[in-house]
């Protein structure tokens, strides 16, 4: 049976908190370090913006332990129960680099443990978290990853993906094209370093998105993130890498985001791309047809208690791990 331990480490004037899940036995074990996706997503890949407590990262950690792999998942400092106190220190200093430092601390903690094989640590990033895993590995760290699993990575720029999501919603409402144009104008001002000044006729949800982007607490990270994509980073990867995007994912698209990743990894035999038929963005099983899915219904089901990891996706991940990072 898996054992879970609460761990923490110091980063600057803050602390990062996480959960280490260990298999049965003395080890040493190969291990996986997880990086959560965007927004206030916590170590279990739950968000206070969404209902439910059945987070995919916890389910993954338990499945990994059953397969003989340790794992560490952690709360980003701007997420989880310590977010408010952390943001009093970090406001205005969040960046891609600060996220990379969080991830580096997690890898270092694992590598320092005698029950972990430091040469057999794999990075597993989800959505935005794939960018932080890639940045860590490409900075030539003192403890390099032996492999990477990139789940639902944005093959296109994050800002392009966000606009694609909004365009799908705009298509279903009157004057959607005009509203999308107003959004584009506000984002252009934001990216140019000016006040976004979103038009008052934009839907409240869109205005909240823009307000979050230009909040002083989120800068400079949000401007960095808006142009970030994983395809150019994947092209620089030299370790075995599994890229998994579900065909029922409506936050990134297995074709539109998969195409640049396919192109970037062409001729690179150490990179494997897989598209499970029924996995949604949270890697959960989605029985509905993709054309019937809408954002509200999918989000409401992400962490519902009766929704489990997609079996095909889980098998892909575990089979890849066993083949690339076998246990002794």
Image (spheres, rainbow, N blue to C red):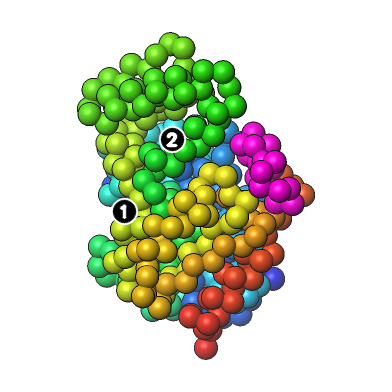
Residue furthest to the right in view is: 306
Residue 298 x, y percent position in the rendering: 65, 41
Whether 134 is among the magenta residues is: no
Pick whichever of labels 2 and 1 is earlier in the sequence: 1
- Residue indicated by mark 2: 163
Q: Is residue 23 in sight in this rendering?
A: no
Asked which quadrant contains residue 138, the reply is bottom left
Identify the residue at horizontal 53%, vertical 82% (top origin).
323
Query: Contact, CB < 8 Å: mark 2 with mark 1?
Result: no
**Disc number placed over residue 101 in the picture, else none:** 1
Residue furthest to the bottom in view is: 328
Asked which quadrant contains residue 193, the reply is top left
Residue 195 x, y percent position in the rendering: 27, 20
Q: In what element is the residue under mark 1? A: helix
Query: Which range of residues does the magenta coloring cover?
Result: 286-302
Q: In what element is the residue under mark 2? A: helix
Residue 231 x, y percent position in the rendering: 36, 58
Instruction: Give the vertical position of 37 relative to 233 (above or below).
Output: above
Q: Quadrant of the N terminus?
A: bottom right
Q: Which mark's residue is nearer the viewer, 2 or 1?
A: 2
Identify the residue at horizontal 60%, vertical 55% (top origin).
247
Q: Is residue 195 in sight in this rendering?
A: yes
Side of 1 relative to 9 (left or right): right
Could you give the CA–CA distance between mark 2 and mark 1, rounded to whole angstroms? 29 Å
Q: How would you rate the neighbour count of disc 2 (Cα within 10 Å): few for under 14, some for 14-19, many for 20 or more?
A: some
Front in this rendered view, residue 267 or 116: 267
Residue 312 x, y percent position in the rendering: 66, 66
Side of 10 relative to 42 (left or right): left
């Amino acid at each position: 049976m898996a054992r879970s331990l609460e761990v923490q480490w110091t980063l600057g004037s803050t602390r990062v908190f996480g959960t280490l899940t260990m298999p049965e036995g003395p080890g040493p074990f190969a291990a996986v370090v997880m990086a959560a996706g965007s927004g206030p997503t916590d170590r279990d890949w739950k968000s206070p913006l969404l209902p439910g407590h059945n987070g995919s990262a916890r389910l993954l950690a338990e499945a990994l332990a059953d397969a003989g792999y340790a794992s560490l998942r952690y709360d980003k400092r701007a997420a989880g129960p310590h977010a408010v106190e952390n943001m009093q220190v970090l406001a205005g200093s969040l960046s891609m680099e600060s996220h990379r430092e969080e991830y580096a601390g997690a890898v270092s903690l694992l590598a320092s443990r005698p029950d972990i094989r430091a040469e057999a640590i794999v990075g597993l990033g989800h959505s935005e978290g794939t960018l932080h895993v890639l940045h860590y590995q490409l900075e030539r760290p003192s403890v390099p990853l032996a492999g990477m699993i990139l789940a639902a990575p944005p093959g296109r720029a994050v800002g392009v993906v966000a606009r694609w999501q909004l365009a799908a919603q705009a298509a279903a409402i009157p004057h959607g094209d005009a509203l999308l144009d107003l959004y584009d104008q506000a984002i252009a001002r934001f990216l140019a370093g000016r006040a976004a000044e979103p038009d008052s006729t934009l839907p409240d949800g869109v205005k909240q998105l823009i307000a979050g982007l230009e909040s002083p607490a989120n800068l400079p990270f949000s401007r960095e993130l808006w142009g970030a994509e994983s395809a150019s980073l994947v092209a620089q990867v030299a370790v075995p890498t599994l890229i998994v995007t579900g065909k029922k994912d409506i936050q990134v698209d297995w074709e539109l985001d998969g195409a640049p990743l396919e192109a970037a990894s062409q001729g690179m035999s150490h990179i494997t791309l897989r598209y499970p038929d029924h996995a949604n963005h949270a890697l959960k099983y989605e029985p509905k047809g993709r054309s019937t899915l809408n954002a509200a219904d999918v989000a409401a089901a992400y962490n519902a208690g009766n929704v489990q990891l997609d079996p095909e996706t889980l098998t892909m991940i575990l089979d890849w791990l066993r083949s690339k990072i076998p246990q002794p």
